[in-house]
Amino acid sequence: MDKVGEVSSAAQSSQKLTPAAAHPAPPCTLVIFGAHGDLTKRLLMPALYNLAGSALLDGNFNIIGVDRVDSDDEAWRKSLAETMQDFTKDPDAEFYTPKIDEKTWGWVNQRLHYFKADFTDASQLEGLKPHVGATGNAVFYLAVAARFFGTVVDSLGKVGLTTQEDGKFRRVVVEKPFGADLQSSKALNAQILKVVDESQVYRIDHFLGKETVQNILAMRFGNAIFEPLWRRENIDHVQITAAETVGVETRGAFYEPTGALRDMIPNHLFQLLSMVAMEPPNSFSAETVRTAKEQLFEAVRPVQPQDAVRGQYTAGKVEGRDVVAYRDAPGVAHDSNTETYVALKLSIENWRWAGVPFYMRTGKSMTGRLTEIVVHFRHAPFGMFRDTPVDRLAPNTLTLNIQPAQGLTLGITAKIPGPKMELSPVEMKFRYEDAFKLTPNVGYETLLYDCLIGDATLFQRADNIDAAWNVVDPVLKAWAADSAGPELYEAGSAGPKGAEELLGRDGRAWEALSGK
């Protein structure tokens, strides 16, 4: 079997991508709809390059790019190669590497083939059959606009490309956003599941490909010290933050009908919620884990408008650079009411979490780039310190650092050296880069590999999607009927004042966006 083995020393030192990543995925043809799109160039190709470098792709693995653009194999290969080289020049790129290994990229490059087609016209996909038939196994990746998801699956079904026979698999990978609300999510699920079985659908969320997100489960269930504490008797509240310093930039046409809530909450942030709050599954099998997530989402009370805050950034400075107001960005209406910031208060009505609020926030053009979960424990009894100079005790916190810092931070109280009883909060930190040798990756490596081997653990099931939309649906409906629009906040700030008031009325405050 022809496979990449010792192609580079960098590949040999690559971190283990999955718990069972010791063997190559089976022979397969990966068909990417949206071959010329940003997702394909910026994320999928670096991920495939890393998988090849880790010897996790079979010698009979092939990649077919489908798009409407006039092109051919050589032109597509050249375009992708140029983008890969660009990653060596930008240290701030999502995938930065000082050098592209020529042998590894050459292995990927020779397996790239281009197929011109209008994927909304099923008859034009007939020509794919001979290419997919080489191995029989096929994964169809929908790296296209969300409005085409159902159409592409319908077209594949009409020409028989989704039919599984003779032990060969046919799978469909669907990107987010999956629907725009509960009703459209149910409709899209119904449309897709008329063509393929649920077991063939892999609804992807790249947050779940991040090592730091997967580590939440390892931290919770692989360490005996946490589970006894992980309940309402010990935890005061939880904050989940995904803040970005970038604005809408040139994505105004996409962002206008979407907004921060649809873009981030039911997918990315709900996946973080599930990792930190779901009940311990009996195993890490796909259905067991996804059922645990669904049970959690069902226990979350639908958010009411008074527990939601929306904001929109105005002109300001972010990290020293001038930022134009959202309404002045290309593709954005000058009177737009689209939110670029959301803060929510969630209540989980089960025995573990009843009475423990979960606060979520996400926004663009913020003062800092930060994704983290902060678990705030209850205050320790103050009685024994009553006759000392200590006037208050800071609560313990456990911060799950996702980005840019990666690891865990435990906030505890310690005595300041000296004759007096004086206390100070201190931190104990674990950082991935200190414990492991990290290599460049984009978070799609694990997800692509899992899809190829048929492990759906990190992918969302239809009921997971619908349950998440059900939680935020009342807010979407209320905002659609409210002409007042979002509260304005200056670019480079921590967000609208209403978000501070959301926690302030409960006697709490957001963590600083500087991170820990």
Image: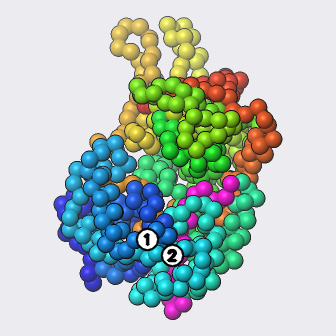
- The residue tagged 1 is 70
Determine whether, in the image, residue 342 is placed left or right of residue 485. Answer: left
For the residue marked with disc 2, what is the amino acid? Ala
Question: Quarter holding the N terminus?
Answer: bottom left
User: Real-space Cα distance between discs 2 and 1?
Assistant: 9 Å
Judged from the image, the secondary structure of the residue bearing numbered disc 1 is loop
Label disc, if present, on residue 117 of the rendered structure: 2
Circle 2: is it few (<14), some (14-19), or many (20+) Cα within 10 Å? many
Q: Is the magenta stretch mostly helix, strand or loop?
A: loop
Residue 464 to residue 27: above or below: above
Residue 52 to residue 370: above or below: below
Judged from the image, the secondary structure of the residue bearing numbered disc 2 is loop
The residue lying furthest to the bottom in this view is 166
- Tell which of 49 and 425 is nearer to you: 49
**Image quadrant in which you'd find residue 24:** bottom left
N-terminal-most mark, 2 or 1:
1
For the residue marked with disc 1, what is the amino acid? Asp
**Image quadrant in which you'd find residue 355:** top right
Give the image location of residue 241, x and y in percent: 54, 38
Q: Which residue is drawn at 33% across and 63% down?
A: 79
Label disc, if present, on residue 292 of the rendered structure: none
The residue lying furthest to the right in this view is 481
Q: Can residue 290 be seen in this view?
A: no
Q: Which residue is drawn at 26% across and 47% down?
A: 89
- Tell which of 432 and 444 is nearer to you: 444
Is residue 53 in the magenta section?
no
Give the image location of residue 311, x and y in percent: 64, 32
Q: Can residue 130 be seen in this view?
A: yes
Specify start and end residues of the magenta stretch as a single range. Answer: 165-180
In front: label 2 or label 1? 1
Q: Are the residues tagged 2 and 1 within 8 Å (C-beta)?
A: no
